[in-house]
Each structure stands twice: as C-alpha cells, then as structure tokens.
C-alpha cells in the first residue's frame, strides 16, 4: 500500500517508487508533482516556468511581452502612450506655434497664446494692436456728445437724468432737461400738460387760473348780501333780485324801485326807507 511508502513514493509491485517516473502522466514541457495523499498518492501536472497550456497534454512557450505602456491609461494625465513609452504630448510633432504655450492636459497637447498676446496658437501669436482713443476730452467731440470712456457718446442715451415726461438734449457736451412743447413743470422731476393757458381754453363760466380752469368767483370778494356770477370768464358781483345797493359793498332788500311804487305823498329812495313828501297846496 502507498501508506507503507515514504513521502512522494507509491507502491508498485511491493516496491516504493516515484509514481511520476513510473507513469509519466504529464505532457511535454510540464512538471509532475506528487501529492502525499492517502490511501493513494496523487499526481499533479504543472507547466514549466515560461510555458503555458494544458499541462496534461502539452505546454508551449508563453509569448514575450514587451515592457512599457499599452494605452494612455497606463500613463499620467500629462503624458501620452507612444511606442510603449509615456511621453509629453507637447514634444510630439510640436503641435503649437513657437510663439504659443503648450500645456499637456488629459494626455493631449493644449495650445494657447501667452498673456498679452492674441491670435491662433497653432499658427502665430502676436501683440494686439493698440488703437488710438476716439477722444480724451469733450472738446474733441461734437457739441451734442461728451467724451465718455475715451469715446464720443450721447450722455442722454447712456443715463437719462431727466424727470418723467421730460426730454433730454445734449448741448455743449452736457445733458439738458426740457419739458416738451406745450407742457409745463420741473423737467428734473416731472412734466405735465396744463389744462389751460388762457381763458379761451376754458368753458364760458370758468377762468384759467394757475393753468387750471376754475370758477373765478372763488377768488372774488363781493359785498354783504351780494352774489357772484361768471360772465365771459370773469367774476362779477351783483345784488340778487329784490335787493339793491352796491354789490361790492352791500345789498339790501328794496321797498320800491320807482316813485309809482309809493303812495302819492311819498317818493322812492331805493337806498333808504320811504320818505314822506309834503303835499303841494294846490293838490
């Protein structure tokens, strides 16, 4: 029995021998290894170092793998894999113009013009031409423009400083606020169209007062007992019917208007009480 034999040996016809030598179970370029298992020894076949394949049949030499990278993922982000070498992409074919800057990014070359230069970094970078300013003072601009940020511009168009409904006009390089024609008000605050400019703009019974059509009687002071009426836009004081007097001073109730309204022996004095007049002798 195999248990009666020493390690790595098996019993063959009462003699302990190496089972790998006796049975030769492995293929070409393979190695046989005895495992001390019981009740029977076990043999395991393994390909020799540098060989691959089925060890029970045949092992063949493994293909030689060259050292180095296979893809960009084997290199750092600032390198690219070329001919199994990780190299700086900026040195491959010099992708940027000599006047430009090349920066390796994500395995690729990134070209850009240096600060202060413009242009195509793949063709040429150059200094941007310095243009002469349009103006440096208001005197270099037309009368309706101001020199703003070295350009002749209309200050009214940039920032209207005027009030509501007002017009902004530039004169002598400065913005000027005006109310539109026919409008009044403070152009810095608000402009508005007046209700009237003269009495003719108002109804017959109104007058133009402070550009508004108002009853002129509100400004007329009449005498005691008198009334104010508007005729042709003007306030007039008059005594009401049945009264008499100076409407600017006072109106009183009259007893008569004519002598015929009095007795034969009286005369009508509209500004006093009835007066007794003596009867002539021949009456």
Image (tube, helix red, strand yellow):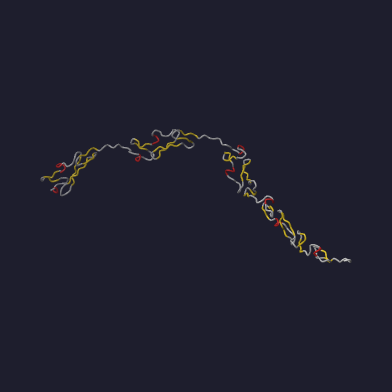
- 201 over 267 or under it: above or below: above
Q: Quadrant of residue 51?
A: top left
In what quadrant of the picture does the C terminus appear? bottom right
59 or 142, which is in the foreground?
142
Q: How many marks?
A: 0
In the image, taking residue 113 as reference, residue 12 lies left or right, namely left
Residue 258 position in % (x across, y down)? 80, 62
32 or 191, which is in the foreground?
191
> Residue farthest to the front?
283
> Residue farthest to the left?
13
Q: Quadrant of residue 93?
A: top left
Residue 189 position in % (x across, y down)? 62, 49
Q: Quadrant of residue 142?
A: top right
187 or 132, which is in the foreground?
187
In the image, taking residue 115 as reference, residue 86 lies left or right, namely left
In the image, taking residue 29 as reference, residue 163 lies left or right, namely right
In the image, taking residue 51 as reference, residue 1 lies left or right, namely left
Residue 168 position in % (x across, y down)? 61, 44
């Amino acid at each position: 029995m195999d248990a009666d034999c020493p390690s790595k040996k098996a019993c063959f016809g009462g003699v302990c021998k190496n089972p790998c030598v006796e049975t030769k179970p492995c293929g070409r370029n393979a190695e046989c290894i005895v495992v001390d298992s019981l009740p029977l020894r076990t043999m395991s076949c393994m390909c020799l170092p540098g060989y691959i394949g089925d060890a029970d049949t045949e092992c063949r030499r493994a293909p030689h793998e060259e050292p180095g990278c296979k893809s960009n993922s084997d290199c750092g982000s600032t390198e690219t894999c070329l001919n199994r070498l990780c190299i700086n992409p900026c040195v491959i074919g010099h992708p940027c113009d000599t006047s430009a800057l090349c920066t390796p990014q994500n395995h690729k070359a990134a070209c850009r013009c240096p600060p202060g230069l413009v242009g195509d970094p793949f063709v040429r970078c150059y200094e941007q031409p310095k243009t002469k300013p349009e103006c440096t003072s208001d005197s270099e601009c037309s009368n309706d423009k101001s020199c703003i940020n070295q350009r002749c511009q209309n200050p009214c168009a940039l920032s209207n400083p005027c009030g509501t409904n007002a017009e902004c006009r530039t004169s002598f390089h400065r913005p000027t606020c005006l109310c539109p024609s026919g409008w009044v008000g403070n152009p810095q605050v608000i402009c508005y169209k007046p209700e009237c400019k003269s009495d003719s703009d108002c109804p017959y019974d109104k007058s133009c007062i402070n550009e508004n059509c108002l009853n002129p009687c509100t400004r007329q002071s009449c005498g005691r007992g008198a009334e104010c009426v508007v005729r042709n836009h003007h306030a007039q004081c008059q005594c009401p019917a049945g009264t008499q007097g100076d409407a600017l001073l006072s109106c009183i109730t009259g007893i008569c208007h004519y002598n015929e309204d009095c007795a034969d022996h009286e005369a009508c004095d509209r500004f006093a009480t009835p007066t007794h007049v003596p009867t002539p002798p021949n009456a």
